[in-house]
Image: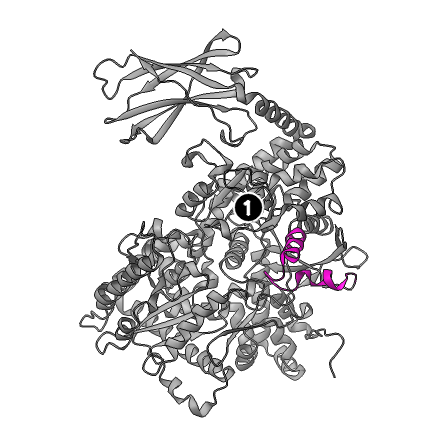
Amino acid sequence: MRAIRRFTVRTALPESIAALGELASNLHWSWDISAQGLFASIDERLWLDVGKDPLLMLSEVSSARFEELSVNSEFVDRVGAEASKLHAYLNGDRWYQDGDPQWPSSIAYFSPEFGITQALPQYSGGLGILAGDHLKAASDLGVPIIGVGLFYGSGYFRQSLSAEGWQQETYPVLDPDGLPLSVLREDDGLPVQIVLEFPEGDLVSLVRVAQVGRVPLLLLDSDVDYNTTAMRGVTDKLYGGNTDHRLRQEMLLGIGGVRAIRAFCRLSGHVAPQVFHTNEGHAGFLGVERIRELVEKEELSFDAALEAVRAGTVFTTHTPVPDGIDRFDRDLIAAVFDNGQSIPGVDPEQILALGAETFPDGDPELFNMAVMGLRIASRANGVSELHGRVSREMFAGLWPHFDPDDIPITSITNGVHGATWLAARAAELIRSHGGASILDAATGWEQLADISDEELWAAKRELRQDLVLEARRRLRESWHARGVSDIELNWIDNVLDPDVLTIGFARRVPSYKRLTLMLRDRDRLAALLTDPERPVQIVVAGKAHPDDDGGKKLVQDLVEFADEVGIRDHMVFLPDYDIGMAQLLYPGCDVWLNNPLRPLEACGTSGMKAALNGALNVSIRDGWWDEWFDGNNGWAIPTADGVLDPDRRDDLESAALYDLLEQSVTARFYEVGANGVPIRWVEMVRHTLATLGPKVLASRMVRDYVVKLYGPAAVSSRAAAIEDFALARELAQWKAAVRAAWPMVSVDHVDAHGLGDEPQRGGQFAVSAEVTLGELLPQDVHVQLIYGRVDAEDRILGSDSEDLDAQRPMGDGRWVFGGQVPLDRTGPFGYTVRVVPAHRGLTTPAELGLVATPQSVARTD
């Protein structure tokens, strides 16, 4: 018989070791090696059997064992020491507390998924892992973040293979009572209920709280008795269901998430956030909820509330292709805000306008979540320098007539949480040479140049051995699941070799990541794998989306090749890629392979994790590798940019990959000195650690967010709110007036004086511009002189700008502006004039997307 309800009974610990419960409940253990060692010492075999999950382990240990440990003075002292260390970590001042007093007192960070630990499987891939690393680094730095997400009852999915190598998915039901979560409760002990109104009925959610070091993570869970069957299933699976289901998830995340934060701050005493950060567009409705709050509580107009919300909102896009953006039928959104989530006194058309695709080639029948994210945020960024450029081009339609470099989307390159992704052996080596605080302070990495060849090579060999043993174990499990008996699997004992060059490749499996590019010439790959002098071995992992049969076919093609006799000893596919697998895979590889279609990889942080563990990247110059490849930290795979035939491009780039592996990578790895160490290879590894180490850290990334985005957003948010939101009200009215008057704005004529026949560097010349402002005044605009070197088509390159001064009125709304231009460079030189809106409340002159440029030829004398 099946139980009608399942729940977990937690262990009652003896008083002397009761702090084990606290240590297990705070996810700080997931990146604290000594805390993990404490739990492992209880029962090392059980620690591995429960997947290194402390809370689960405590429920499996016998009472007799706990009684034995409770009188073991050495163990009791260890528990006390770990608890004291955790308390000091949670309560002491850290980097943020010594920072700028203008920084926000609290920040809300929204993401549809969070990859903290495999013990809390609420992630699918890079976006979630990045979000988890963001929270961990914020905790280490003392940044006062509150995380907000959803609790998915089945997580993403577990992957296995059929006998034919086809991906199969299962969705094990998670018991939240057995996870490191608590329920947010009112003062009377009843659970907090977050309620959203939909046309078809209410959606009620509980708030489950995970403690990630110093950072609370709020996860909304709709699987509660108050809901209908349909509403209970809203948080069933990550990225599951149809369009209606996805919309409900995203509204619960955004709208429900803001309400969860309000309840959490009210009950915990936590300071209310001044800055809201949405990690990708899924949580964009948080802006609508915050507008509703201001309309109802502060009696602001919709436009004034929007300005107040924008001031303190940050939006990060991770998507390099339009197809990766969530877009909903406009009528579906309208139905929700007409009847359910309506805001009193607000026309739903105003909400619909936030996500409208009003740009060329946009679809007026769709509501675009990324577009809403950009319109609601005063500050936006991509996740690498190249992705920032791609994003500015992709969303250029929102800022027509502006050059791509002027579009207000900056970039902060992603990072990875060192303490999570460094293997214990690698962490020991790095800390012994760079200092105990190297992962937080990002200093001391240059001292890694002192690691001896022998010490570094021995560490990498040990990590490679760990990977080989784990790969064999997982491979055996996979074959069992495919229906093969042990008697047929003796060959697995010889799979992989700890002394062979090991290449890793692990990704989600959309087509643009090109899982099977390595199979383009199978004979050439087989020759690489089985070379008697310089063999190569490859470990591959990755999940295709359950609805992506094309991705599943790629997995099957690779598995079929890896299954072949003669190949299977040298190449393996490991199913069910997760954090636990990744933590062995990255350190155990010598080379990390990444071959996406450029420029479709937003960042690609897996290569950062591998580099942090002493692997060399072999990658297409996409994402982070485009900006940080220096010629000595790995190899760049040449790209066939401009080749439009995808098959031809794959042929060219796969051939370039084979050439690199055959002629450069394997030669360098197997070129050993008298001490048996490949000296030049180890030099590259040491250089990688010393130079890439501080760059790839999530602590660097979070510092960048604080200084470049969170701090300025907090200043803007406070300014917008003072004196009963006076600036927000003023800015909304001013924007409406400027938009109405802008059709009359023009640059009528431009004159230059003082150039002479042979202008020379160091001189200057004067520029005057006749400008029609219509109903606007000079203080409403910047009349900007844009100048710099020009190319053969007279495009200004690397331009500078100067504001021209209003010199005199000409009547009928026309003005003369003027100023000086320094000739500070030689070569072809050019200039132009433009008019953009100006107001103290604007974050950027491009904010309104309005610009006027000359319609006549400039005159010089």
Q: Is residue 50 above or below residue 435?
A: below
Query: Where is mark 1, residue-wise?
Result: 370
Q: Position of residue 251 (x, y in %)?
A: 66, 51
| Image-based side of 377 in relation to 12, left or right | left
| Residue found 51% across the figure and 75% down from its top | 160
| Residue found 63% across the figure and 61% down from its top | 241
| Image-based side of 193 in relation to 129, left or right | right
Q: Residue furthest bottom?
A: 487
Q: Position of residue 369 (x, y in %)?
A: 58, 47
Q: Residue furthest right?
A: 188
Crowding around mark 1 (Cα neighbors within 10 Å: few <14, some 14 to 19, many 20+) is many
| Image-based side of 563 in relation to 268, left or right | left
Q: Position of residue 225 (x, y in %)?
A: 78, 64
274 in the magenta segment: no
Label count reads: 1
Question: Callout 1, which amino acid?
Answer: Ala
Q: Is residue 280 above or below residue 505?
A: above
Q: Which color scheme is applied?
A: one colour
- Give the quadrant of residue 475: bottom left
Quarter of the image for the N terminus: give it: bottom right
- The region drawn magenta spans 226-253
- Give the quadrant of residue 51: bottom right
239 in the magenta segment: yes
SS majority, magenta: helix
